[in-house]
Image: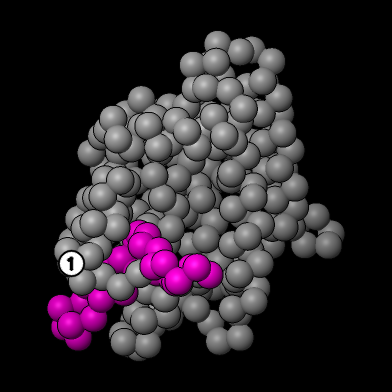
Amino acid sequence: MTSAANVPNKSISPFTWRVRFALNIKGIKHQTEWIEFADIEKRSKELGIPPSEIKADGKPFYSIPAIYDSSTNTRISDSLKIIEYLDKTYPDTPQIIPPGTSILNATLSWAVGKTVFTLFAPVFSNVIPALTPEASALFRARFQGTMGVTVEEFRNDKALPAKIWADSEEAFKAASAWFKTSDGKDGLQPWIMGQNITLADLIVGAGLAWAVLASGGEESEVWKRVGSWDDGRWKAFWEKMKPYAVLY
């Protein structure tokens, strides 16, 4: 399952893309059910999907992605738990999480999240108008709380977007250095951990999928800018991930 904007087939969660990539890499047949952001908890309860976590105050927290596997009658939410389940349940398919990499993956996930989140304002200023009224109100409040201005004020401001773009380009430039060896050569071989695609690649690819698709596609201003940065590194990486981005 994935949350959807009012425009078909546009997910606003990079975590759903991690699971979609994993399912496609493994060749596991599946069907996507699109869920509005505001309906995640309600629909999860209707489908018997367990909460992703229990908060410190004891309240359950429901999130997407979530899956139902009819072959084992299993319901799971949280992208990492889902991918761990898929690796364990389908051992004859490509394994996404190599043994001993959990700490590295968690660190990369945090770092990629910090990098991609620098695009929050440019992406969500485009996403919010496409959301349903209820979801739009929730994200407008989040946008104003994060940015200190409304969506409309951000769009009409010249200085703030320019600073956001400059900061984001610097963040992606720093991230690009992760992919280089000590002598400055490209370290991809062809994937982050060598010959096989792993969760590390899904983490980066999902962040790029969000930047591409939530912002309006490959022709959007957001992706044209990001795709041109760092000698086209991010565009090239997205092109490698695209075969696994098929929607079912």
For the N terminus, give its image quadrant.
bottom left
Magenta-tinted stretch: 52-79
* Res. 99 in view: yes
Question: 190 and 73: which one is in front?
Answer: 73
Q: Position of residue 151 (x, y in %)?
A: 49, 22
For the C terminus, give its image quadrant.
bottom left
Which corner quadrant of the image does residue 86 belong to?
bottom left
Query: Could you tell me which secondary element the residue under label 1 belongs to?
Result: helix
Which corner quadrant of the image does residue 172 belong to?
top right
Asked whether 54 falls inside the magenta stretch, the response is: yes
Which corner quadrant of the image does residue 46 belong to?
bottom left
Would you name the residue on which mark 1 appears?
Answer: 47
Q: Is residue 41 above or below residue 82?
A: above
Residue drawn at 36 percent across, 62 percent down: 62
- Amino acid type at image mark 1: Leu
Q: Is residue 189 above or below residue 91?
A: above
User: Left of 58 or right of it: where is 109?
Assistant: right
